[in-house]
């Protein structure tokens, strides 16, 4: 009889062990299913944005008909959908003067819009000498040098705004009144709210009802910047445009 009891105990233990193993495996599969569902959701979200960028890039090419392909629009470069917003506004509103904070593909887009409009000029503030050279070469490659000027503007301490470093305006023409301002710099790691100084420091160089396009507007820092601008510049209108990195569109009064 004793051996039967021992056998029952062993069998019971084996059954419990197998049941525990099965439960463990089922639990892992269950959790993996949730993880897979999340990843599928991420892939779906990314694929939607990727399609939107491809569509925006195609539309941009159709609008601009540049003589040479645009440089890569990934990484630090402005996304195709943001560039498309710039192009659509510039071609419709036909600003006489556009000003950029940071040069790059947006400089090419704006210069081409000025050319298509038959008038106007874009001035681009650039703190990085390497990027300034690259943009100037690209303007030459696209035969757009007469429509854009890249200004070497190193980042300097701002006496009026302690804690901020922003573009030096020493080489920037004082007579300019920009009708369009595109803000895609300086880099976010420059200082806290790195792009905030744009309006306080440029307000005397912006035309009445100047149109402002701010890239990376889905970041918390950029949203805080917009709130400050709205509080400090009365009558400013703002709307957010759905872009890969976010776009805030402001109209100054």
Image (spheres, rainbow, N blue to C red):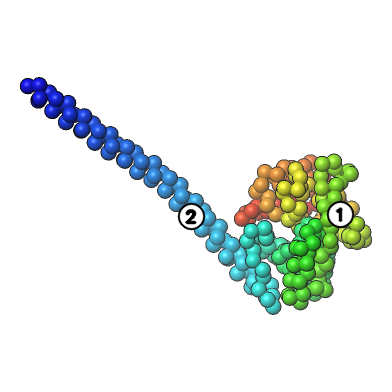
In the displayed structure image, the side of residue 29 where residue 57 appears, left or right? right
Front in this rendered view, residue 73 or 224: 73
Q: Residue at the location (64% across, 63% down)?
A: 73
Residue 86 is labelled as none
Residue 168 is labelled as 1
**Residue position marked by numbered label 2 in the rendering:** 44
Determine crowd level at label 2: few under 14, some 14-19, many 20+ residues with C-alpha closer than 10 A: few
Residue sitting farthest toward the right: 175
Please state the horizontal and vertical placement of residue 221, each as a whole percent of the image: 70, 44
Determine crowd level at label 1: few under 14, some 14-19, many 20+ residues with C-alpha closer than 10 A: some
Where is 240 relative to 6, above or below? below
Please state the horizontal and vertical placement of residue 243, each as a whole percent of the image: 63, 56
Front in this rendered view, residue 141 or 62: 141
Q: Residue at the location (42% across, 48% down)?
A: 36
Tag count: 2
Say which element carries label 2. Answer: helix
Q: Is residue 99 visible?
A: no
Residue sitting farthest toward the left: 1
Residue 229 position by quadrant: top right
In the displayed structure image, the side of residue 19 where residue 141 appears, left or right? right
Quadrant housing the N terminus = top left
Q: Residue at the location (67% across, 58% down)?
A: 76
Q: Earlier in the sequence, mark 2 or mark 1?
A: 2
Residue sitting farthest toward the top: 2
Where is 101 relative to 146, above or below? above
């Amino acid at each position: 009889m004793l051996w039967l009891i021992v056998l029952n105990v062993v069998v019971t233990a084996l059954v419990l062990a197998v049941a525990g193993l099965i439960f463990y495996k089922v639990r892992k599969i269950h959790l993996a299913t949730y993880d897979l569902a999340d990843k599928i959701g991420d892939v779906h979200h990314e694929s939607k944005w990727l399609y939107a960028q491809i569509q925006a890039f195609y539309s941009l090419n159709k609008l601009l008909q540049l003589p040479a392909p645009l440089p890569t629009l990934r990484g630090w470069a402005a996304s195709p959908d943001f560039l498309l917003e710039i192009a659509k506004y510039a071609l419709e509103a036909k600003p006489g003067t556009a000003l950029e904070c940071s040069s790059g593909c947006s400089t090419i887009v704006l210069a081409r819009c000025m050319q298509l409009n038959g008038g106007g000029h874009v001035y681009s503030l650039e703190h990085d000498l390497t990027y300034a050279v690259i943009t100037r070469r690209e303007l030459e490659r696209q035969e757009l040098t007469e429509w854009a000027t890249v200004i070497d503007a190193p980042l300097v301490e701002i006496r009026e705004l302690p804690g901020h470093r922003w573009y030096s305006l020493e080489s920037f023409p004082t007579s300019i009144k920009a009708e369009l301002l595109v803000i895609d710099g300086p880099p976010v790691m420059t200082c806290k709210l790195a792009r905030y100084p744009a309006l306080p420091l440029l307000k005397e160089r912006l035309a009445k009802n100047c149109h402002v396009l701010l890239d990376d507007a889905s970041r918390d820092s950029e949203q805080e910047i917009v709130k400050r601008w709205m509080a400090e510049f009365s009558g400013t209108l703002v709307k957010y445009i759905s872009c890969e990195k976010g776009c805030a569109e402001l109209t100054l009064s």
